[in-house]
Image (cartoon, rainbow, N blue to C red):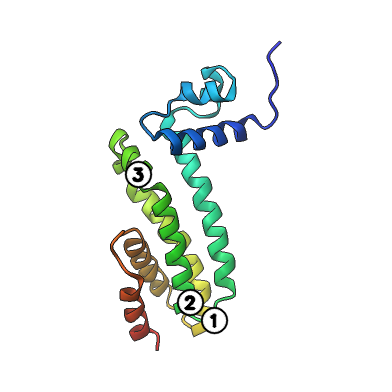
Amino acid sequence: MPKIIADLEEKILCEANELLFSKGYQSMTMRSVADKCGIAVGTVYNYYKSKEVLVAEIMLKDWVKIMEEVKHDCEGSVDIHEAFKIMFDGVSKFTEKFDVIFTQYGKETNIRKQMPIQFTWLINQLSGILDEVLVRCHGETDEYMSVFLAEILLQTATKKDFEYDNISRILKRIFK
């Protein structure tokens, strides 16, 4: 009779996350995750069809958590400047956490083929938050403004050497 492990999927994610950040993407294997969980490697594959899918789930889980925090914090923002800074910091936090992992992940997988789909999804998610702030704080109803700002946000917040003050100056010119 097979053993039953409570919350096995969560355990797999937790152990994989720990291995990912302690050993790195290349050293984390489905077998090492299974060993840490005390289960057969086939059981891990029952939940995640590949290492890439498992890592993507770890990244997605963190992204969702950060975006929930960002959305909550933006609901109390007084203007687009405050909201944009909150969002910039959230995206930067995510990028910094996964920078090395994402670089290794991108080298080993065909992730570049899927990037336009993910990029569009991220833009839509970010522009939805921005749209709420723009309407609430500035009476701005042009849907392209939030998409434009989301694109700028994603491009700037993911660059290590980009300083927020540069985008802040431009935002002040657009939203006086």
Pointer 2 with pointer 1, Cβ within 8 A: yes
Task: Point out which mark residue 157 bears.
Answer: none
- Residue 116 vs 55, above or below: the answer is below
Pointer 3 with pointer 1, Cβ within 8 A: no
Residue 144, percent from left and from top? 38, 72
Amino acid, disc 1: Val
Amino acid, disc 3: Val
Indicate which disc, 3 or 2, sits on the residue closer to the N terminus: 2
Task: Point out which mark residue 100 bears.
Answer: 3
Q: Residues within 10 Å of mark 2 (few under 14, many from 20)?
A: some
Which residue occupies 30% across, 33% down?
A: 108
Task: Point out which mark residue 82 bears.
Answer: 2
Kindly identify which residue carries mark 1.
78
**Quarter occupied by the N terminus:** top right
Which mark is nearer the camera, 3 or 1? 3
Of residues 34 and 143, the one nearer the viewer is 34
Residue 119 visible? yes
Which residue occupies 51% across, 79% down?
A: 135
In this picture, residue 49 sits left or right of residue 12: left
